[in-house]
Image (spheres, rainbow, N blue to C red):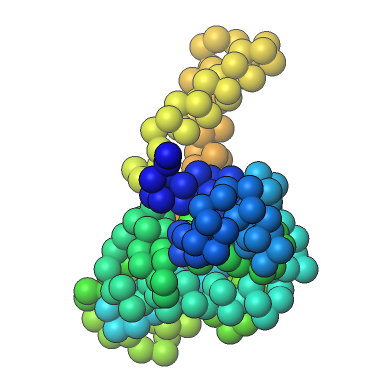
Amino acid sequence: MSSITELIKELREKTGAGFLDCKKSLEDNNNNIEKSIETLRKKGLAKASKKSDRAAIEGAVGFYSNENITALIKVNSETDFAAKSDTFLDFLDSLGNLVLENNTNIDKEQFLKLQFQKGTVQDYFNSMIAKIGENLILNDLVIKNKKNSNYSFYIHNSYRINIGKIISLVEYSTVDNNAEIEALSKNLCMHIAAMKPESIDIDDLDKNLINKEEKIQKELILNSGKPSNIVEKILAGKMKKYFSEVTLLNQSYILDQDKTVRDIINQYSKYKYNLISFDLINL
C-alpha cells in the first residue's frame, strides 16, 4: 500500500494542485486517487495541470522597491485580457510584495520554493492558474541590492503605476542626484525601452554575438563580389554600424539623433554621472 506521501505526490503530478489541497482531498476520499482527482476538479483545483502546457505569451512586468532592494517580476499569461484583469494584477503585486518581504537576492527557482501562506509560491501559482483559467509562468525575476547605487525606471503600456508591458531600469552613481540627473536617468530608461540595446558598451557585448555578426557580414561582403583586399575595411565599417545599433552608449540618442548616448552622458560630467547597469524586461 502506498504511503500518504507517495499518494500526495501522485495526486499533485496528476492534477497540479497544491500539497495541502491534495492532502485534504485524499483524507476526504479515504486515500482514493480517482475520487480525489474528481473532488479537486469539482473545486476547480485540478485545472492547473491541464493548462500548464499551454503557450503563455502575454502577461505583464511589475516594478517593486524598498530601501534595500529593487525587483522586476515578469509573469506570463495566455491572453492580454487576463493580464489586464485585477485578479492577475493583484497576483503580480502579491508576488512583488513577497520579494520585498524576503529582502534578499534569489533566483526564480528559489523564489518558487519560498513558503507562502499554507504552501509554496509554486502552489500559489497553481491555485491562480485554476482561478484565472489560464497558464501562468514566472518568466523573469531581477533583484538588485541598492547599496550605494541609484535607480530609475520607465514603464511602457502601463496597467498600473508599477506594472506594464515593458519596464526598463537603470542603475547609476552620481555625486548629486538632483532633478537634472533624475530627468536624465528617466530619459535613458525611455531610450532603452525604445531601442532595446544588448549591452552598455562594446566591451560588455557577448563575444559570441560579435563573432556571429562578423561571420555573417564577412560572408555577405564576399558574396557581393568585392575585391578581397578591401573586405576587412568594409567589414570594419559594417561592425561599427552594428555596434552603434546594439550598444547603448554608441546608439543615437532618441531625443537628439545628432548625438550618441555617450555624448549626452558626457554633458553631465560635472556630476560624475556613471551608468552602472541596465535591465530591460518586455513581453
How far from the left and from the top, in percent, is residue 147? 22, 74
How far from the left and from the top, in percent, is residue 151? 37, 75
Q: Is residue 238 in view? A: yes
Name above or below for residue 242 compared with residue 158. above
How far from the left and from the top, in percent, is residue 244? 52, 47
**The residue positioned farthest toward the bottom in the image shown:** 179
Rendered residue at 38%/45% (across/down): 3
Name above or below for residue 206 compared with residue 249. above
How far from the left and from the top, in percent, is residue 54? 70, 47
Rendered residue at 69%/15% (across/down): 224
Q: Nearer the viewer, residue 174 or 116?
A: 116
Q: Nearer the viewer, residue 84 or 36?
A: 36
Q: Is residue 174 in view? A: no
Q: Nearer the viewer, residue 39 or 234?
A: 39
Quadrant where the image shows the N terminus: top left
Quadrant where the image shows the C terminus: bottom right
Rendered residue at 43%/30% (across/down): 208
Name above or below for residue 95 compared with residue 209. below
Q: Nearer the viewer, residue 267 or 115?
A: 115
Q: For the image shown, how many numbered marks are present on the structure? A: 0
Rendered residue at 47%/82% (across/down): 183
